[in-house]
Image (cartoon, rainbow, N blue to C red):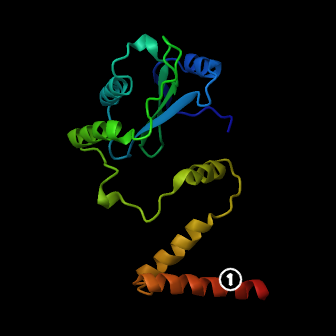
Amino acid sequence: MGRERDGVEVLRGDPEMVAAVADSLEFEHKYRSIVIAWAPDDRPTDARIGAVLDEFEKTAWAGLEPDRYAWTAVLHREHGGGVHVHVLTARCDLETGKSLNIAPPGWQKTFDPLRDAFNHEHGWSRPDDPARARTQQPGHRAYIVAANLRAGLEHEADPRDVITDYLVQRVENGVVQSRADVFAALEDAGKCRARARTT
């Protein structure tokens, strides 16, 4: 939005250097971005955030000396208490000049155990906790809508959200109890919309 954000702090590396290295690359994919996030109730201390970043670095660039990669970690604190660390890395080995992707396909097998170890050790919120499950994952569009709302811009409701809300309301009221009920509810909604267009 062109506005400086509060609660932003560079924890590791030099963002300007990472950008310069990434801009100099001729690869199709010049950089990699990662977000390490904590729920508002987690309230990690600076020392624990540092410990997570230490282990992340050891895992992401295992076997490489620090002068062979360019990365930066930027802390962002949300108003509600959430904490995010945005990690950016140029996708190359600085010694060889070859492409270096720290999160290739199947990256979850490498990073999920690290995440799980910290979550269990400190009692932090876990993404696999059934109590935290959502009916629908908001996806990237939720961030765009939130940014537009903060900027005072209007936004159009996502049809997926409208349909989900419609069905959840009917489930909560006992109208939808089976797969067949879902189809019937959607069919009724389509008929109502068609009638509304003709009147």
In the displayed structure, 163 sits above or below 183; it is above
The residue sitting at 65% across, 87% down in the picture is: 191
**Label 1 residue SS:** helix
Q: Position of residue 175 (x, y in %)?
A: 45, 87
Identify the image quadrant of residue 102. top left
In the displayed structure, 125 sits above or below 64; it is below
Identify the image quadrant of residue 188. bottom right
The residue sitting at 46% across, 17% down in the picture is: 69
The residue sitting at 32% across, 32% down in the picture is: 45
Alpha-carbon neighbours of circle 1 within 10 Å: few (<14), some, or many (≥20)? Answer: few
In the displayed structure, 174 sits above or below 138; it is below
Q: Position of residue 197 (x, y in %)?
A: 76, 83
Hey, what amino acid is under mark 1? Answer: Arg
Foreground pick, 35 / 26 = 26
The residue that label 1 is drawn on is 193
Foreground pick, 3 / 89 = 89
How many numbered circles are shown? 1
Q: Residue furthest right?
A: 199
Horizontally, residue 18 falls left or right of residue 12, namely right
**Quarter of the image with the C terminus in it:** bottom right
Foreground pick, 19 / 41 = 19
